[in-house]
Amino acid sequence: MAAQNRVLIQGGKVVNDDCSFDADVYVEDGVISQIGKNLQLPGGVKVIDAKEKLVIPGGIDTHTHMQMPFMGTVAVDDFYTGTKAALAGGTTMILDFIIPKRGQSLLEAYDQWKAWAEPKVCCDYSFHMAVTWWNDKVGEEMETITKERGINSFKMFMAYKDVMMLTDAEIYQVFCRCKEIGGLAQVHAENGDLIDECSKKLIALGITGPEGHAMCRPEEVEGEATNRAVTIANRANCPLYVVHVMSKSAADVVSDARKQGKVVFGEPIAAGLGVDGTNYWDKDWRHAAGYVMGPPLREDTTTPAYLMDLLANGDLTCVGTDNCTFNANQKALGKDDFRKIPNGVNGVEDRMSIVWEKGVHSGKLDENKFVAVTSTNAAKVFNLYPRKGRIAVGSDADIVVWDPQATRKISAATHHQAVDFNIFEGQVCHGVPVYVISGGKVVVEDGGHVMVTQGAGKYIPRKPFSDYVYKRIKVRDGLLQPKAVEREPYKGPVIDLNAQP
Ligand code: URP
Ligand code: ZN
Ligand code: ZN
Ligand code: ZN
């Protein structure tokens, strides 16, 4: 067996979401095969020195859009550059969104996305499925997608009117279907009707720049939709996962729902934790447009710290990125009308460092909580655990040797992403991945040398009815069955509606 397939990570501190301990970790054929001290090992082993470093489960980015066709163009980071950048930053798995066009078969869209990803993807990956239109056939396909294609999460849009937005009645029906098939319902929570109306008004007033994007989508527009999604999910007794929680208002709705015992999860993203919405008012159009995404970053500069606090206390669950990148000349499609600026920002490469810097270095998260919010919680919610999200014998060898003291400066000039802009430009972060192991292979070495193979990532199918999400739902289903009151039939008189007065 080649030394490539046998790796010993020596002298580090293993960090899982629930404990930390000093141990060596031995990897063979893509799987963690031994953990401990003084391991008995065969010859031909590549040794990695992890002294004074943390040995953590590879990051899982719960929310990406690689090479996504969107707003007339295609996201510039594809499954190659996007996953190469992910690995460079310590993320070893992505969950990307399949987004069928209105009227398109879910299975056909699956085949399309799979064909895009398979030859290019450098790390393991899985898919969420968006439900952008609704009828009985879509409901049937959801079951096939779950049982035969391994997808257990479905995203609905409450925004992007006339493109992907569903009505409340449709959302309720999709949530009911999710519950039947053991899927997790996800929502993009913004009131699409209000955004549409308000943006028309702003354009009429001559406000055409990126600040208009933020003005037509204030916090309450996100908070209202989040509350509506929580209510609809509760009526369907369906578990809910709110993607890209961007505001205090939306985060508070998630937090309150959890206090009320509802099965709701919230996902902040690297952008929302690392930067704020004041950038939309920047005098430089390109700079301001670089931050355009939906829901927008918030003008309230205390928002990122607030979201981090909720992540620290467990009210928010997983950190994604919504990585969906467009170059300057693509953003410029909206130079005269903010409604035409392709929505999306970077994050897949910098997510781990941003969470370490803003969360751990600031004293809000400990190393275990860091692992929980960047990897383990995602593995549990999306039913990948303990194959992913844990350093344990038998788990996939997706491992990061993390230097908590080292720093790096983020810049578009040095990042591995294809996009020509970085929303975190100039930020210095503590926490650097010095080695990254993906599927048992060393893909990032000391000094930041990245050695990836296109197509090496595996598609990871996921089973429905994740315990972490569904145990409570199943019990509630039994308790919530509506029962009619048993009573004698009414035998008295009934008025005749046809009788003339
Ligand atoms: O602006 C964003 N978020 N772009 C990607 C599509 C989405 O809504 O997630
Ligand atoms: Zn979205
Ligand atoms: Zn998204
Ligand atoms: Zn620092």
Image (spheres, grey):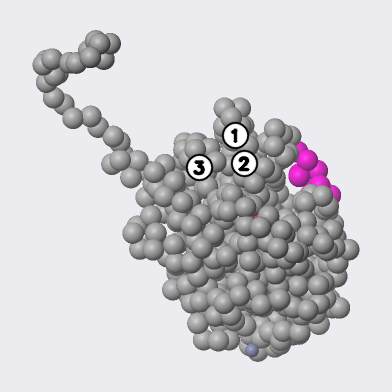
Q: Residues within 10 Å of mark 1 (few under 14, many from 20)?
A: some
Q: Residues under labels 1 and 3: Cα distance?
A: 12 Å
Q: Residue at x 81, y 82 (%)?
A: 447
Mark number displayed over residue 168:
3
What residue is pinned by disc 2? Answer: 131
The furthest residue to the top: 499
Identify the amino acid type marked 3: Asp
Location of residue 351 in the rendering, given as x and y in whole percent from the top left corner: 67, 71
Identify the amino acid type marked 2: Val
Q: Residues under labels 1 and 2: Cα distance?
A: 7 Å
Residues drawn in magenta: 111-119
Which residue is nearer to you in this view: 319 or 254? Answer: 254
Q: Residues within 10 Å of mark 2 (few under 14, many from 20)?
A: many
Q: Residues under labels 3 and 2: Cα distance?
A: 13 Å
Location of residue 311 in the rendering, given as x and y in whole percent from the top left corner: 50, 72
130 in magenta: no
What is the quadrant of residue 115 in the picture? Answer: top right
Q: In the rendered image of this protein, does residue 108 appear above or below residue 278?
A: above
Identify the amino acid type marked 1: Trp
Label 1–label 2 contact, CB within 8 A: yes
Mark number displayed over residue 134:
1
Q: Determine if residue 69 is in view.
A: yes
